[in-house]
Image (spheres, rainbow, N blue to C red):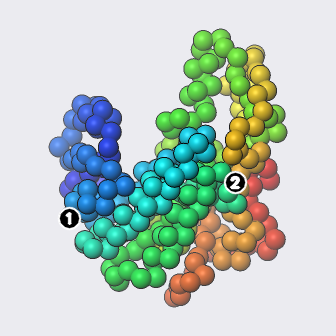
Amino acid sequence: YNIKEIRIFSRDEKKQDDMRKQFNNAKLKFYIGDIRDAESVENAVQGVDFIFHAAALKQVPSCEFYPLEAVKTNILGTNNILTASNRTQVKKVIFLSTDKSVQPVNAMGMSKALMEKVIIAKSRNIRKNLTLCITRYGNVIGSRGSVIPYFLGLIKNNEVLPLTSKEMTRFFIPTSLAVKFVLKRLNDQLGGELYIPKMYSIKIFDLIKILNAKAKIKIIGIRPGEKINEVLLSNEEIRNTRFYKDYYIVYSDNLNYKKKVGKKLFQNYELSSKN
């Protein structure tokens, strides 16, 4: 892409220094700051055209133990992005959400569900040349803290793999497809809508057998805040949803869209990792 500058905004100076050395590219600019600090966010977005908002507390157990921290980052931090974007000359913001925001049972999912609500509500009352949209998907294969690198590490050391339940299922998407999906939203977003890619789902038990058929497994029981199956698209959202090529679009109830693309879906349907 013919981009003048890419800004990396985070509070993690170690990862920023690693990236600076790894890429060694003058287009990359690094900004130390915290999504929770409105002033540092506003300073970082001056002169920016597009924002990809990926900052989040996303580990289910840590959010269960410290739910207010999830609120500060996932909800209030998102609001700081919205406020700073509206005050500056930002053109488009793409927010990354999760399947755990649908029918949430844990603090991480609840905070992400409220994040989505804040974005959609804000879409009604922003300047005309700013558009917002949300992408929602499941587990990104190989991402930091995800299950596959964890399992591979245990397999390499010939250790027992912990499994919460043989029935547990999850959605998975390769990193490259997740990145392409998010980038494509720059071109087609209308404002206030939510995009969901078609995704594969699998039983975690089967995933382990694919990684290593001889792996030793120990059933440890479901952890606090975990579901057996995840949901990407709820039955309640279906009436506002259209299916287009390889993704779904959920249109907001509160916004008047001049044009809606895609086909309507059947009513009384839920897109679950079980089905």
- Residue 128 drawn above or below residue 143: below
Q: Judge whether residue 200 can be spotted in this image.
A: no
Q: Which type of secondary structure does the marked residue at label 2 adopt?
A: loop
Identity of the residue drawn at 59% across and 62% down: 113
Q: Amino acid at mark 2?
A: Val
Q: Which residue is mark 1?
A: 47
Residue 204, disc? none
Other residues around mark 2 within 10 Å, as few (<14) / some (14–19) / many (≥20):
some
Gap in Å between the C-alphas at discs 2 and 1?
Answer: 39 Å
* Residue 31, image x, y percentages: 24, 48
Q: Which residue is mark 2?
A: 105
Circles 2 and 1: CB atoms closer than 8 Å: no
Other residues around mark 1 within 10 Å, as few (<14) / some (14–19) / many (≥20):
few
* Residue 163, image x, y percentages: 74, 29
Identity of the residue drawn at 33% across and 35% down: 15
Q: Which type of secondary structure does the marked residue at label 1 adopt?
A: loop
